[in-house]
Amino acid sequence: MRELVVAALVCGLALGAVGFDHPTPGLGPGANGARYATDAYPGFDNVDDILKPERKEPRWFSFITGPNRENAKDQFAYCKGLIRDEDFSKARKQLDALVREWPTAPEAARAQQLLAEICLEKLKDYEDAFAEFRYLLDFYSLQCDYAKIADRLYEVAGILRIEGKEIMFIRFANTVDVRRAYETCVLRAPGAKWVPEAMLIIASLREDEGKFTEAIKVYENLRNLYPEADEAKTALVKEADDRMDVLREREYNRARCLDTIDFMRHALKRCRPEDSVTISEYLEEARGLIEREAYMGARFYDSSTRTRRSAIRAYERFLSEYPKSVYAEEVRTRLEGLKGSVEK
């Protein structure tokens, strides 16, 4: 059985079973030619950090670290032999050496994909597997099945999210690295079916970092780009949660408060029925914040250092704007008293 698996890996991947001759259009290209949606993803990290790949070059002391054969064809055959012998660590190094030494050879793209698959399936080195699949998309986008490799990249990002980062045989949470991995997937395949799900994950990872303003941007962009997706409904209530967190935690800001009220009104018209109660409560809370600020502003004029007429005008203005406020009855009572004293 083991021999059959190894044979499948060699024959299927090395001979192009995934398909190198028919790239799928529409998802987004690699780094060697066409456009990215670099300005369409607010809330992502600096796209230059994600979209500027470095091409592999021959290593120093290549007489030691370089390929063991004289040309790409023989080197590729040699690598397949290493895989048949299950010497996956050496096969990894020699496939990488092939790509570095002969990057434009017909075997280079197949070697790069085989390298990525070995890192993933045999060596379980998920961070390197992600980097190698990314390199395949970046530099061999026209020689591979772009859609399938993009799906593979997304699959590895999911594994990274579960596995964490290993440092000295200890695993740690790697929120930032995983988020950037998902951002890499979206930017390289903006038309893939999993993009709305990926953007939800990116926003949630932003929340894990405590960066709620950035998470809001991602949720908002998700809703704008994929308004009919189920993920857009989830993004709506998640964005409402984050907007309220920002409103509560930061110093009062009237413009932010008004913007939050407008958002909650919009959200109530578009949310799922089961989310309407939560959003209604958020709307009332935001309204309460702005009413209290207006009430405190009116009371500022009701002091010994201000004239009664200034206080009357302030209270009348408050009642005209918030006639049903929880403070309305108190204000009316005080207003009557002020007006009575002026008349006397």
Image: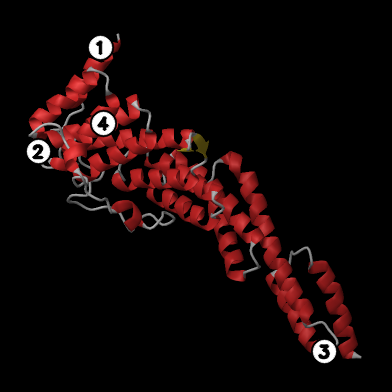
Residue that badge 1 annotates: 4
Please state which of residues 9 and 31 is positioned toward the viewer in this rendering: 9
User: Does residue 226 show up?
Assistant: no
Does dot 2 land on a helix, a strand or a loop? loop
Gap in Å between the C-alphas at discs 3 and 2? Answer: 85 Å
Answer with mark 4 or mark 3, whichever residue precedes in sequence: 4
**In which quadrant is the C terminus drawn?**
bottom right
Task: Nearest to the eye among marks 4 and 2: give it.
Answer: 4
The amino acid sitting under disc 1 is Leu
- Decide which of tag 4 and tag 2 comes sooner along the chain: 4
Q: Is residue 53 left or right of residue 202?
A: left
Assess whether mark 3 and mark 1 are in contact (beta carbons under 8 angstroms). Answer: no
Spatial separation of the CA atoms under disc 2 and disc 1: 28 Å
Pointer 1 local density, CA inside 10 Å: few below 14, some 14–19, many at least 20: few
**Residue 107: % across, % down:** 12, 33
Q: Which residue is mark 4?
A: 92
